[in-house]
């Protein structure tokens, strides 16, 4: 079994794709009720947070496709598939687009700013999107993976 370098762009790409899948399930936004209403919600064990799946209408699907493209690029490159370069281009484009979208949604979260706060899932999602973009671009720049010589 080959040794995987944890610092290689391909490893960063694959790990960022898997992480982005998982981060979509974490809280991205929360409602700050405050006062008696907040205390009542906490007492009643009411969840006042929303994951990316709950908060977005289309951005969540784009984030999902970005994670899928990153993992597909990781797998195809590892198998020396001829479509690995195209998958890397798709992952790079989606990674850059989603990095910008998530950054925008951190600055301008859905809903009124007085009541909605950004939670840790959004920041982790931003890091994962940037990791996909970085890993895909670096994987494309590295060129095709070397193959073992035939005897």
Image (spheres, rainbow, N blue to C red):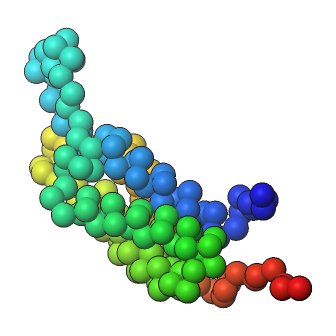
Image x and y of residue 76, in percent: 55, 73
In this picture, residue 54 sits left or right of residue 146: left
Asked which quadrant contains residue 96, the reply is bottom left
Quadrant the N terminus occupies: bottom right
- In the displayed orientation, state which residue is furthest to the top: 43
121 vs 147, nearest the viewer: 147
State the residue at coordinates (23%, 41%): 50
Asked which quadrant contains residue 44, the reply is top left
In this picture, residue 59 sits left or right of residue 70: left
In this picture, residue 139 sits left or right of residue 25: right
Image x and y of residue 115, in percent: 15, 41
9 vs 104, nearest the viewer: 9
- In the displayed orientation, state which residue is furthest to the front: 151
Q: Is residue 85 visible?
A: yes
Q: Is residue 39 visible?
A: no
In this picture, residue 41 sits left or right of residue 23: left
State the residue at coordinates (63%, 79%): 80
């Amino acid at each position: 079994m080959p040794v995987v370098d944890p610092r290689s762009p391909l490893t960063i790409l694959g790990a960022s794709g898997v992480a982005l899948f998982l981060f979509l399930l974490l809280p991205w936004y929360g409602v700050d009720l405050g006062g008696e209403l907040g205390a009542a919600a906490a007492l009643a064990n009411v969840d006042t947070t929303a994951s990316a799946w709950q908060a977005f209408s289309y951005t969540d699907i784009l984030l999902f496709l970005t994670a899928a493209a990153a993992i597909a690029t990781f797998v195809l490159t590892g198998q020396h598939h001829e479509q690995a370069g195209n998958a890397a281009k798709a992952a790079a484009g989606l990674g850059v687009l989603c990095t910008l979208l998530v950054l925008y949604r951190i600055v301008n979260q859905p809903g009124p700013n007085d009541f909605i706060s950004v939670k840790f899932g959004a920041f982790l999602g931003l890091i994962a999107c940037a990791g996909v973009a970085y890993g895909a671009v670096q994987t494309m720049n590295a060129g095709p993976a070397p193959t073992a010589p035939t005897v």
